[in-house]
Amino acid sequence: MNLTGFIVGLIFTKQSRPSLSVFGAESWLPGLVSIAIMRALAPLVTALITSGKVGSGIGAELGSMRVTEQIDAMEVSGTNPFKFLVCTRVLATTITIPILATFFGVVAVIGGFLNVYVNEGTSWRTFIQQFFEPLTFTDFSASLIKSIVFGFTIGIVGCYQGYYSTKGTEGVGKAANGAVVTAMFLVFIEEIVIVQITSWFR
Amino acid sequence: MEKGKATIDYKNAVIKIHGLEKAFDDYEVLRGIDLELFQGENLVVLGRSGTGKSVLIKIISGLLTPDKGSVEVLGEDISKLNDRQLQALRIRIGFSFQNSALYDSMTVRKNLEFPLVRNRKNITRKEIDTNVESVLEAVGLSQTINQMPSELSGGQRKRIGIARTLILNPEIMLYDEPTAGLDPITCIEINELINEVQQRYKTSSIIITHDLTCAKSTGDRIAMLLDGQFQRQGSFEEVFHTNDARVKPFFDYNFIQ
């Protein structure tokens, strides 16, 4: 997450510079970076990374528990496995992915600043002032809501794929794979829907 | 090893099954099963692989639902129970899985504590420790308390699996292939443990197996499941003292005579 965030911030700034320099508008770079990171990149890239890492992990773990009858064992010992295994994991992803997205945003800002500092010599103070200037409350709240929705999706998809996996070891692989593919697909769909809804409030 | 005398109450059936049918897609696994398990009895269900033995005990524990017929466990018709009632009933039933189904992310201690902590909300730390030590001692594996399931042998895993079910003091024990994949010495130890559990915890048990040594040493009664129905029931000798072409090969190929 550290490395990806830093590189995303750095590369995005670097790639945006030529377009702005045509109009002599390099000073808009911090504002452009802030909008891109806050509105889209931080929640989206965090969700994609965690779909691969956490979603597949949940899918494989629950899938393995299913095929080795550990979930059945929980059920027959009078425990509700759905509450114990699914609710806890969905809650965990829903809470932690917004935190991770915030962290990702901070690291991406540092990456962006480094590029701007090296090329334009902009100070940290000026960069931060320009960074927050175009942002509104809607941007922060939309980003937070997006991360929460993404976190819930990744958790619930991973759990569903694992909890209902069948066919032994093959099923565990399919559950892990299905968790990543389905979660990523849904994350993109949700991104489109939330961006559309947010634009009505802007 | 011959089985010791158990106190069986033939007037009190803890499980009553009538006309039980179960199919998966077009394959009819159970075709009209009638069965009673009496208080204090060890009933062995014998049969070839794929005859629905495990399906039968999964239906009894509510893991699978029957297509037809009634299943009454400890006086409760399981098809009429809601989730909460079924959960309460399951605490009174112990289920020992074929592959032990130990939680592989937890130590032996945590595995044994799990059913207690989840089902007895006001239990103290001291009571938990006492119960864990007691069941571990009952299965003869006190030294494994801090080990992970991956560090245990097949026989030890079976014993810990049985200990985990015993910790809730079940009235009924369901054993799914308790000796499958074990060496002959460990099989004998597991058979002895099943008999010990019957005596010490006063359980009534259904033992699913195709191991005739296990059937002979643990069963008070044997039921032979063939073609989705019980074809023969009785003592070991009664079931196998036959020229029935469907039963005899099972005995001839399986048992060291």
Image (spheres, coloured by chain):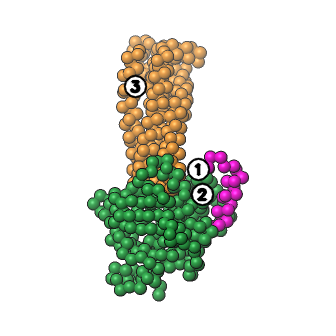
Chain colours: A orange, B green
Whether tag 2 and tag 1 are in contact, CB under 8 A, the answer is yes
Q: Is residue A168 magenta?
A: no
The amino acid sitting under disc 2 is Leu
Q: Which mark is residue B119?
A: 1
Residue A128: image location, x then y, percent: 56, 17
Residue A162: image location, x then y, percent: 44, 48
Q: Residue at x 59, y 67 (%)?
A: B202
Chain holding disc 2: B
The amino acid sitting under disc 1 is Asn
The residue that label 3 is drawn on is A194
Chain holding disc 1: B
Residue B53 in view (yes/no):
yes
Image check: B152 left or right of A16?
right
User: For the magenta stretch, what is the residue range?
Assistant: B120-139
Q: Residue at x 54, y 55 (%)?
A: B91
The residue that label 2 is drawn on is B168
Q: Does the magenta stretch include residue B129?
A: yes
The amino acid sitting under disc 3 is Ile
* A37 w.r.t. B106: above or below: above
Marks 1 and 3, Cα distance to the nearest angstrom? Answer: 42 Å
Sequence-wise, the earlier of marks 2 and 1 is: 1
Q: Nearer the viewer, mark 2 or mark 3?
A: 2
User: Quadrant of the rendered structure where residue A107 is?
Assistant: top right
Residue B38: image location, x then y, percent: 50, 69
Marks 2 and 3, Cα distance to the nearest angstrom? Answer: 49 Å
Report whether mark 2 lies on the same chain as mark 1.
yes
Magenta stretch, main secondary structure class: helix
Q: Residue at x 61, y 66 (%)?
A: B201
